[in-house]
Amino acid sequence: MVKNYSGANWLPHISVDCVIFGFHENQLKVLLLKFKNTTVWSLSGGFVKSSEDIDQAASRVLFERTGLKDIYLEQFYTFGDVKRNHDAIKQHEKIQEQIGETRVDTSFLSDRYISIGYYALVDFSKVNVNLDQMSDQFSWADIHDIPSMFLDHRAIIDKALERLRWSLDQKLLAFNLLAETFTMSELQQVYETILGKKLVRTNFQRKILSMDILVRLEKRYLGGAHKAPYLYRFDEKKAKAYLSESDF
């Protein structure tokens, strides 16, 4: 049976695509899915049910792929290039042939088709990736080493990273990528990989501590000869007070 995503259960011509960022091995990563029997990768995405809000659709897609709820998720851009229509039909048909499964009705793509972009910030260690029926592999790709992507998904990643960089301090987003406790060095590494540049350690530490948004905990002893660093915890109450008093 041919699947028809344009029926009463789904909103026609609208989808959500989620750029799921995680931090691992001192690098910012993005979760990608590979179509079966192809070399084409895609973001986690899906259509919008007629019974749900757009934000609810994005949260559902995120939960289906990562098993996570109540994480940072932000709508950042709408992608509606006219060329998406023609490219979508061609790529869908080619991928379905390579997958070797029942063809999906793509007639609903003949009209204007847009995608609403979201980005999510997750604790890498908590993600349990679930593949969809059209994928056979997933990868946490380095943002500097993105493979061949479906449609304009590379542009969606680039736009999400641009928005993340812009909002990094304005919304104190870096802490969403870390475990509950972390060192100052780990926090600096998150900033550096997102911004794409090295930061002076003393200046960075002075800036962060001046915000008064962290709670200092015990030291992390690793048994080596090096000085043990302090662990910190993000204080949401202090952060809200800081943001309300700032000029952002």
Image: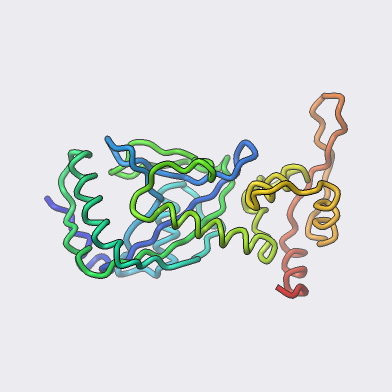
Residue 69 position within the rendered picture, expressed as x and y whole percent measured from the top left:
51, 54
* Nearest the eye: 54 or 156: 156
Give me the residue at 56% from left, 59% from top.
162
Image quarter where the C terminus lies is bottom right
Task: Return the residue found at the far top.
Answer: 224
Give me the residue at 25% from left, 68% from top.
12
Task: Return the residue found at the far left.
Answer: 1
Q: Is residue 4 left or right of residue 169?
A: left
Q: Is residue 25 left or right of residue 86?
A: right
Give me the residue at 75% from left, 58% from top.
235
* Nearest the eye: 42 or 133: 42
The tally of labels here is 0
Residue 214 position within the rendered picture, expressed as x and y whole percent measured from the top left:
79, 55
- State whether residue 165 is above or below residue 11: above
Q: How is the image coloured?
A: rainbow
* Nearest the eye: 170 or 66: 170
Residue 106 position within the rendered picture, expressed as x and y whole percent measured from the top left:
19, 58
Q: Is residue 140 left or right of residue 4?
A: right
Residue 157 position within the rendered picture, expressed as x and y whole percent measured from the top left:
48, 54
Give me the residue at 73% from left, 54% from top.
234
